[in-house]
Image (cartoon, coloured by chain):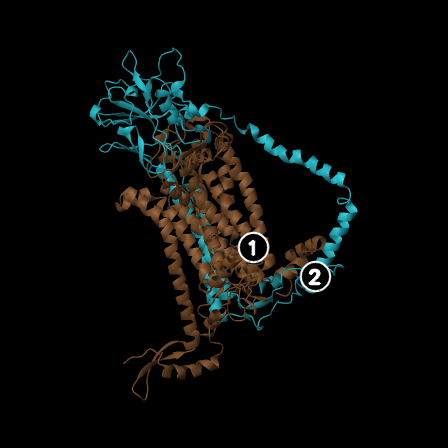
Amino acid sequence: MTEQNEYPESGRVPSRVIGTPPADAPIADTDPIRAPEGVPGVIPQDPVKARKAERLVALLFLVAFLAGAGFVASYVIFQVGTIDKTATSNLALGGTLALALLSLGAGLTVWVRQIMPKYNLIQERHEMRSDDEARGYVKETFLQGAEESGFVKHRLLRRTLLLAAAPLGLAPLVLLKDLGPLPGTVLRRTAWGEPTKDGKPRRLVVEGTGQPIRAADFNSPGGILSVVPEGYEEDLNALAKATLILLKFRPEELKSGTNLNWTHDGIVAYSKICTHVGCPAALYEQTTHHILCPCHQSTFDAADGAKVIFGPAARPLPQLPIGIDEEGYLVAKSDFKVPVGPSFWERGDAEAEVRENAS
Amino acid sequence: MNAPPKAIAGVSTFVDDRIGAGNFLKRNLRKIFPDHWSFLLGEIALYSFVILLLTGTFLTFWFKPSMSEVPYTGSYAPLYGVHMSEAYASALHISFDVRGGLLMRQIHHWAALLFVAGMTVHMLRIFFTGAYRKPRELNWIIGILLLSLALIEGLTGYSLPDDLLSGAGLRITQGVAQSIPIVGTYVSFFLFGGEYPGHDIIPRFYTLHILLIPGILLALISAHMILMWVQKHTQMPGKNRTEKNVVGAPFYPAFMIKSGAFFLFTFGVIALLGAFAQINPIWLFGPYTPADISAGSQPDWYMGFLEGALRLMPAWEINFLGHTVTLSVLIPALVPLGIVMTGLALYPFLEQWVTGDRREHHVCDRPRNNPHRTSIGIAGITFYGILWLLGANDEISANFHIDLYTTTWFGRIAVFVGPAIAYWITYRMCIGLQRKDAEVLSHGVESGVIKRMPNGQYIEVHTPPAEDIAEHIRGKKEIPVLTSAEDGEGIPPKGARSALGRLRAKMSEAYGTDRVPLTDGHHEEAHEEEHAGVGGGDRKELH
C-alpha cells in the first residue's frame, strides 16, 4: 500500500508520550463491535468484482473532476446580461454543477456498495431510563440543593424573586409596541375622501397612465377600467384601499342593488379590493357582468351592487359615489360610505348603519 | 495500513489530550445504523436545509431588503426604467447581472420546496411505522415544530422578492391576519408597521427569514439529530432484529460515506432542477402593486392546502355586538392547519391513552399491522390532499374544462366524504394485506410447480417463503388492549366506569384487536400443513 511508504518505519516514530495511545494503534482500537474481516457481520466483497468497481468509481470521480472544472470554465466563459446570455450561463453552470455532484455521489455509492464489505452488525440497545440508583441519587441531590439554597425556606426571597422577574419578562413585549401605529379609524377612510389642494372633487384617473376620464369618452357598455385617485398614482398604501373598477351599463341592465345616485350616466365605480382577504378583484365577464377575484373566486354581480353570488367573500364590493366636474371628467363625490377591503373586528355592520342613516 | 497517517494521529492525539474525544469516538465510530429506503427521506430534508443555508447566504450578498422605490436600471430590458422596490430590483439584479445568481436563486427555491416535501414524507414515514412511539415522542414534537417553522420560513421567503406574485401572497397573509377577532387589526398594523403594504414588511420578513427562523430551525434540527443519535435509529422488523438491538452498518466508514453520497445526490438533483426547470420567474410578473394581480396566482406547494381551504369555504360573516367575526376567513385559515398540526402533535399521546401501551418501541410497525393508525393517517392525507388539490381549482377548471363552481362544490363535499371513504378503503386493504401475510406464513408461496394427484386432481405446490420475508412478516407485534372486562362480580375496572372510560375501552378494543392473528410459528409445521391443505381443499385447484 502506498500509505506505508509515506509513513516512517517505527524507529523514527517519537517515543510515546504518557497519556496518549501508542502511535502505532488507532485510538478507537478497543471498540467492542469492531470486527476484522472474516468475522460474522462483516461480509467482504468478491475481489474480482471489487477491482471492476474500482475502475468504475475512478471513472466517475474523473467525470466529477471534469464537470467541476467545466463549472469554473463556464463561469469565466459565459457572461450574463441579456435573457439569452443568462439562460446559457444558467444551463452551463447548473449542468456542470449537477453532473459533478451526481457523478461524485454515484462514485461514492458504488464504492460503499461494491468495494467496502457488506455489514450486518448487531449492537445492543439499552432502555432509555436511568436506573433506580441514579434516579434516587438525583432526587436526593435535588432536595438537598433546594434545602441548601434556602429557596423553600425563605418565602420572602422566593416571592420577591418572582416579582422581580415579572416586569423583565414583560419588557420584550412592551418593546414591540412601536412596531406599528395603532389602527385608529384609518381603515374606514380612503384617498377618495382626502381633500384636494384646490378644494375641487378628486378626479378618477386610469391606473398606469394617470389619464383623467371624460365621462362622455367612456361610453362602451361592457367596458371595464382599473382606476386610481388622482395624486395617489404611486402611493401603494393609498392604492391598497382606493383602487376602483369602473364599468358602464345600459340603464336597463342595472338592478336594485346598485345605488343609482352614485352612478353617472350608467357608469358605476366599485372598490377593486376584494372583501374577502383583499386581492384585487380583477377579472370581469362581460356577458354575465360577473366580477371574479382570481385568488379565491369570490364572484360579484356588477349589475346588482356587486353583491356576492359565489365564493367566500361575505360582503359586496363597496360602491363609490361618482359624478363629473365642470370639464366633464369623472370625479368622486365623496369617500366610500363603508370601509373597503377585508373585514376586521372593529368594522361592525357598516352597511346596516348606512341603510339606517339613509332611511 | 498498520498505523494511522501521522497527520491524523497527530491531530487526534492533540484533540484527545485536551477534550478526551477518544472516549466519545470509541463509543460512536462504529455506531450501527439500520438500513431501509424510507430512512433516507428525512435526510433529504436535512440536506435540503444545508443547501438552503449555502445558497441563501449567497443570495444575501446582493439582495436589498428595502421597499424604497427606485427606477430599474439593470440589464433586463423589458423592465428598464420601471419604478419598483429596491428588493425587486436587487432580485432582478441577482437573476440577470450576477453570474450564477439565477442558478442560486432557482436552487434556493427548489431546495425550499424539497425541504418541506422531504420533511412531510419523512413525517409520514414516522407516522405510518409508529416510530413516534415511546421513547421518541419528544423528537416527534420537535419534528412537528420544525415542519410548522418551515412553513413560516417558506412564507417569509417567497414574500421577499416583492414581485406581483409574492405581493399577492402577502396581501392574503395580511387579510387573514386582519380577520383575527379582537387583535387582528393590531396584529396587521404591528406586522406591517401601519397600513398595508407599508414600507416595513420586507425588511422585517428578511430578518425573520435569514436570522430568527433559520436559527431556531438549526437549533431544533441539531436537537433532532442528537436525540436520534442517543436513542439509536428504529429498525424494520426482520431476522435477528429485536427491541433490544440494532442491526445494520457502522457509522464509520459505511454509513458516513453513504450519507455523504446522498447529500451529493440531493444537491445534484436540485442543481439539475435549478439548471433545467424554471421556477418563480419574477421578471415576468413585474413589480408589486396592490391594484393588480394575475390570474392563476398560486402559492408554493406547502401553502396550497391553506389556499384550498380559503377557496372552499362558503361566505360566512357574523356581526356580534357591533364587531365583525369573519368566519369565512378564520375557519379555513385556522381549522385545517389546527386539525393537522395538533392532531399530529397529540397522536403519540392519544395512542398511548387508547392502548395503555407504555413500553419502549424500537422495531417499526409495518403500516398494515396497525390498520386503524394507517387508516387515520390516510384519512388525514386525503383531507390535506383534497384541500391542496382545490387550492388550484382555477387551474383544474381551466385545463380540464370543468365549471369553476363545480370544482368548488366537489371540494366542499369531498373534504368531508373523502377522508371517510379513504379510512374504510385503507382499513380493508390493511386487513387484506394481513391475510396475505398470514397465508404466506401458513401455506407458503406459489412455486409454479403443478402436481397431479393420484385421484386426478391438480394442485400447485407451495414452498415455504424465503427466510428474510418470513422474518419480516413475523415481526408483527400485537397492539395492547386495555382490560375493560368485568371481573368475577360483574364490576368493570375502575377506569372504565365513566362515559369517557367506556369510550376509551371501546376504542382500545377496536384499535388493538388483531383481526388476522398469524398462526404459523415453525417451518416443521409447514410441511404438515401442506398435506392438510390438500385434503382440506384450500389449494388452488385446476380442474
Badge 1: residue crowd in 10 Å (few <14, some 14–19, many ≥20):
some
Under tag 1, what secondary structure? Answer: helix
Query: Does B158 sit above or below residue B535?
Result: above
Farthest-out residue, front? B489
**Residue wearing tag 1:** B137
Query: Does B100 sit above or below residue B377?
Result: above
Q: Amino acid at mark 1?
A: Glu
Q: CA–CA distance between discs 1 and 2?
A: 22 Å
Q: Which tint is chain A?
A: cyan
* Position of residue A18 in the picture relative to residue A353 (left or right): right
Q: Amino acid at mark 2?
A: Asp
**Residue wearing tag 2:** A132
Is residue B129 visible in the rendered structure shown here? no
Chain letter for mark 2: A
Badge 2: residue crowd in 10 Å (few <14, some 14–19, many ≥20):
few
Which chain gets the brown colouring? Answer: B
x and y percentages locating residue A219 in the rendered image:
22, 22
